[in-house]
Structures are given as structure tokens and as C-alpha cells.
Amino acid sequence: MGEHLYWGRLETRLRKRLADFEGVAGLHLRERAGNRIIDINGSEVFPTASSIKINLLAALVELHARGEIDLDERVEVGPDSSVPGSGVIAYLQQSTKICWWDVAILMIIASDNTATNMVIDRVGMERMRDFNARWGLSSTVVDRKMQDYEAIAADRENLSTPKEMVEILSLIGSGEGFSEGVSEMCIEILQKPKKGPMTAALPKGTRVANKPGGMDKVRCDAGIVYLERRPFILAVMTKYFGGDPMDQDYWVADTIRIVHSAMHNLDDASAHGQGIVAPPDPRG
């Protein structure tokens, strides 16, 4: 009962925090090994920004595992075929060839928009619709490429919900519904270092597999946080924020920090709420 009260206290604090947000915010928190969940506007649909790249990565690697795509194949990248915004390909001095693995890595760690558009073209939007449907993600949509402002103005957007972002990460983490080896390959890439609210919020050295996203008025992050005894999956998504974008980044990071602090406290406690400490060394 004590842990139930502690979990309820965390939910109360988060509900107030999201209610006070100057915009619209949603959160879904799920214990990876347990059945505890906190869902606050978890089924609200949000623009995903770059967090949709989690789904794109999963689809790309699944097709590789099926033998339909060879990620060892080298493809030309460079400034002539690039789109602006985040990433590095648009700023290369000249074209070069890299393998599709590296395209996927650039998409995740540098949030490279050119790499992402290459993945969208390679997988195909129709196959992405099929994948999302097969994974049970009825509100998740890949409907435009990166930096496609005409599509944005026409309300064609990449969308998901906090609950479905947690669900795809849960499936990736467990390997459920994927071909052999896909889980390990995706997690390896999602664990690579990157900047974002979750990285800023977590203590240095925390193992995390995540992908942040950000556009005007939109900030989000979703990831698996590997605590020793109480790993958890969390998605925080925001929209309609009218203030300083840095304040929005800080708000998302602080929300993640609150969740991590509570989960880390549970991770270090017994079922009765007592801290678990190492026994003293009898040798002094």
C-alpha cells in the first residue's frame, strides 16, 4: 500500500504540473517490468517532430531483418540532395557515400533531416502506415517529410500520442512483433548520445534509449530509462506553447527529472519503502 501512495503522490504532482503548462501537454509513464502506469492526456494527439524517427528506425531495421532492405548498401549523400535544418549532411563540402546504417545513425543522433527523408523514401509512407497499423498505433501517422512547409500548412503532419510513443518503445525494447535481432539493433542506435530534454534531465551515465523532437510551439521526448530494478518508459509531448522555446525545453526536461527522481527513489527502496544499502565491509 505504501508504494501505491507514493505512486499516487507522483501522479498528483504531475497532473498539477501539466495543468499549469502554458500550452497543451501530455505524458505517459509505464514501468517496464511492472504494471504501474501514469497517463495524463496520454491519448491526446501531438505533432511528433523528430520523435517520429523512432518509428522510422524500427520500420527500416525490420525491413533489413526481413531481407527487403540491405543496410550495408552504400548510398550517396551530400549538399546537392539535402534539406536544411538539423543534421550534418546539408553542410558537407562535397558528396560522399555512406551505408544505410550510418544514414539511420545520423537520423537519430544528429536528427539529420536529409537522412530522415532518405529513410522515408526508402521505407515508403504506405509501408509506414502498414507498420504503424500492425503495431496497433492507430493515432500514429507519418504524413510528410522533414522541412516540408507546404505539407505543414496543409495540415499534413507526423503525429502520435504519448501512450503510443511509449507503446512503440515497449515493443522495440521487448522485441515483440519484430523479427529476430531488430530490438537489439534499434536499441543500440537509440542509446547513442544525443542532445535533448531527456539527456539534460538524467544524471550523467544513465543508460537511456530515446529520441527527442522539437518544432515551433512543439517539444517532446520519449525513451526507455534503464534503472537497475525499476526501468521505465516515458513520453512527454507538448504543443501550442507561445513563450520562449528554451522555457519549453526546460519544462520538458524538468518534468522528466521529476519522474526520474521518483523512479530512482523506488529503484533504491524495498517493497516497504526502506532504502537498500550495501552491507558494511567487515574488513573495515
Image (cartoon, grey):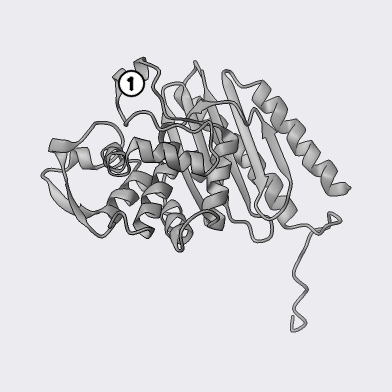
**Which picture quadrant has residue 67?**
bottom left
**Can residue 85 be seen from the camera position used here?**
yes
**Residue 277: % across, % down:** 76, 65
Please tell me whether mark 1 sits on a helix, a strand or a loop.
helix
Position of 246 relative to 224 (above/below): above
**Which picture quadrant has residue 20?**
top right
Name the residue type under label 1.
Ala
Farthest residue to the bottom: give it: 283
What residue is at 23 percent from the left and 32 percent from the top? 83
**Residue 227: % across, % down:** 63, 56
Farthest residue to the left: give it: 94
**Residue 59: % across, % down:** 40, 47
The mark total stands at 1
**Residue 88: % across, % down:** 25, 42
User: Label 1, on which residue?
Assistant: 151
In front of the other: 152 or 105: 152
Query: Label 1 crowding class (10 Å Cα cut-off): few <14, some 14-19, many 20+?
Result: some
What residue is at 37 percent from the left and 47 percent from the top? 109
Q: Is residue 22 left or right of residue 66?
A: right
What residue is at 12 percent from the left and 36 percent from the top? 80
In front of the other: 55 or 274: 55
